[in-house]
Each structure stands twice: as structure tokens, then as C-alpha cells.
Image (spheres, rainbow, N blue to C red):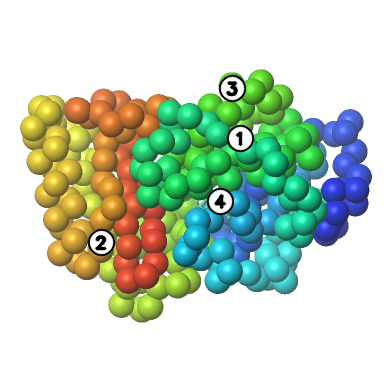
Amino acid sequence: MRIARAIADLRLDRSRRIALVPTMGALHEGHVSLMRRARQEADLVVVSLFVNPTQFGPGEDFSSYPRAEEQDAEMAMQAGVDVLFAPSVSEVYPRRTTTIQVKGVSARWEGEHRPGHFDGVATVVCKLINIVQPQLTYFGKKDLQQCAVILRMVEDLNIPTTLVFCETIREADGLAMSSRNRYLNPHERETAARISHVLHDLRSKMSSQKLAEDQTSAALLASTADLEAHGIRVQYLALVDSRSFEPLPIPESGASLIFAGYLGSTRLIDNVQIP
Ligand code: AMP
């Protein structure tokens, strides 16, 4: 595996089928699942490791975001990655004069609670795709609204790559793997499993019963109260259309239940899709 710090050092063989897996590092099995899938589907696997400052708001965890490059390089190598692209901030952003804004799908939920976040995500993903020019680009459904925003950007701007969205990898107790899970203290870590339990219970209820509008909102409210009773400060727990991220009044096949909230000072997100 090669480590490239500069765009000029990438020197990718464009006759091969190239896959890109964008990450912010602090790698875990969720990231590795994307790399393995890319390894199976492409000839040349590029993983970017870049903590993107433009997707963090003021007061968010940009400076304290976990950085573990040596371990990351080891994990990427084990997963069969060919090139680890780990550029500096000035390599990616010599200037910050152009920003991509994906309207509509980025407005609510994460967009509302993290103003500017998706502008930063869309801009850096567009840049990484332009730099690497991959045939295939991999994302995790753990960040489902991010998938919807990137899909819309790629469609709107005719970006010539195929997006591959991969299932969320979870810990044994159901907690969605996340680089931010390492912020949790042991008590919070135990409580955090409640999030996926509540989401999965809601999903079973919504897929096995035909809920009316008032029953749907009552179920969402009851689940929110359950999480709050466990000390989880809920920012949103909602039923949405998986592509538009508009709220839905009643469950339908393919819709998603999305969650964001705080456990102590750690912000966690998760989602499940209704079958
Ligand atoms: P991040 O480093 O958090 O920006 O994540 C890089 C990529 O890995 C994104 O496409 C994430 O959605 C994906 N990812 C993060 N956690 C998981 C997980 N638990 N399961 C699957 N994919 C994940």
C-alpha cells in the first residue's frame, strides 16, 4: 500500500477500474466493510483519509476529532487498499472560494442541527471524486442523509461515478460503529445500545402493523420519551422518505427512521430502513 500526501503523488493507473472510499480516519470495522467491498468490485482501491474542516461547525469537534494515522494505515493495508490518500488541509483547500450547496435534501435534520455541514461534505466529496476520478465511490448508510445529499449532487452535476451505499456495521449490542463512539465513557457506552434497540423496535412496529397518522406520531413520541428516560437527549427521531429526506406521515416500505442526539457531550446518529 502506498501513502500519498499530495495530489501529484497519486499517479493512478487510469486504465484500471478505480474505487474511492472517502473517510475521516479513526478507522473501524464500518470503514473496513466499505474497503472490502471496494476491493471485490474494483482493481485499484483508493481510501482518502482527511478530517475535513469545512464540514465542522464552530464549537464542534474538528480539533479533537480522533486521529490515529498509523493504526489507520495498518487497517487499510489489511483490507487490501492500494493507495491511502492522506492530504493536508492546504493541499485540499489552497483557497476556499467555491462551495457546493445541495438544496432541499440537505435542509432538515443534520442540515438544521449542523448548519453548513452538508456544504462542507458535498464540496469535499466533489473535490475527492474529481481528484481520484473513480468509477465507483463507496459510502455507508450509517450517514444516510449524507448518502441522499451526495446522490443528489452526483445526479445534479452529472458527476461520472457510480455510488455504492453499504449497510451499517454494528457492535454486538447493536450500536452503530462510529469514530465518535470512543468518546463515550463506559456507562454512556452501555446506554448507547438503547438507540438501535429503540429504532429496531419502531421498525418492527411500523412494518407489522398498519399505523394511522396519529399512531405513527404517537409511536415516535413514545420512543423519544424512552430514549430521554435513558438519559439520551434526542435532537430528532423521525420517519422520512429515504431519498428526499422529507418527513412522512405514515410508514411505507423503503422509508427510514432517523435519529440524532447527545449522550453526555457525544453526538450520535443512527437510522434503520423499513423493509
Ligand atoms: P467517516 O470517517 O465517519 O466520514 O466515515 C467514512 C465512511 O464510512 C462514510 O461513508 C460513512 O458512512 C461510513 N461509515 C461510518 N460508520 C459506518 C458503519 N458503522 N457502517 C458502515 N459504514 C460506516
- Residue 139, quarter of picture: top right
Earlier-in-chain disc, 3 versus 2: 3
Q: Nearer the viewer, mark 4 or mark 2?
A: 4
- Rendered image quadrant of residue 37: top right
Q: Is residue 143 above or below residue 195?
A: above
Label 2 belongs to which residue? 233
Type of amino acid at the residue the image marks with label 3: Glu
Residue 2's spot in the image, x, y percent? 85, 57
**Image: 74 above or below 14:** below
Indicate the amino acid at tag 4.
Gln
Give how far apart the Cα atoms at labels 3 and 2 are.
Answer: 35 Å
Disc 1 + disc 2, Cβ < 8 Å: no
Whether residue 178 sits left or right of residue 74 in the image: it is left
Residue sitting at x 25%, y 28%:
248
Task: Residue 101: give x, y in percent of width and height.
Answer: 55, 34
Marking on residue 55: 4
Of the residues shown, which amino acid type is indicated by label 2?
Arg
Residue 157: image location, x then y, percent: 64, 23
Task: Say which amino acid is labelled 1.
Answer: Ile
Discs 1/2, front: 1
Q: Earlier in the sequence, mark 1 or mark 2?
A: 1
Measure the alpha-carbon separation of dots 1 and 2.
31 Å
**Label number found at residue 100:** 1
State which tag comes first along the sequence, 4 or 3. Answer: 4
Characterize the local packing of mark 3: few (<14), some (14-19) or many (20 or more) Cα atoms within 10 angstroms: few
Q: Secondary structure at mark 4?
A: helix
- Residue named by callout 3: 155
Residue at the image point whose x is 50% and y is 46% from the top: 116
Q: Secondary structure at mark 2?
A: strand
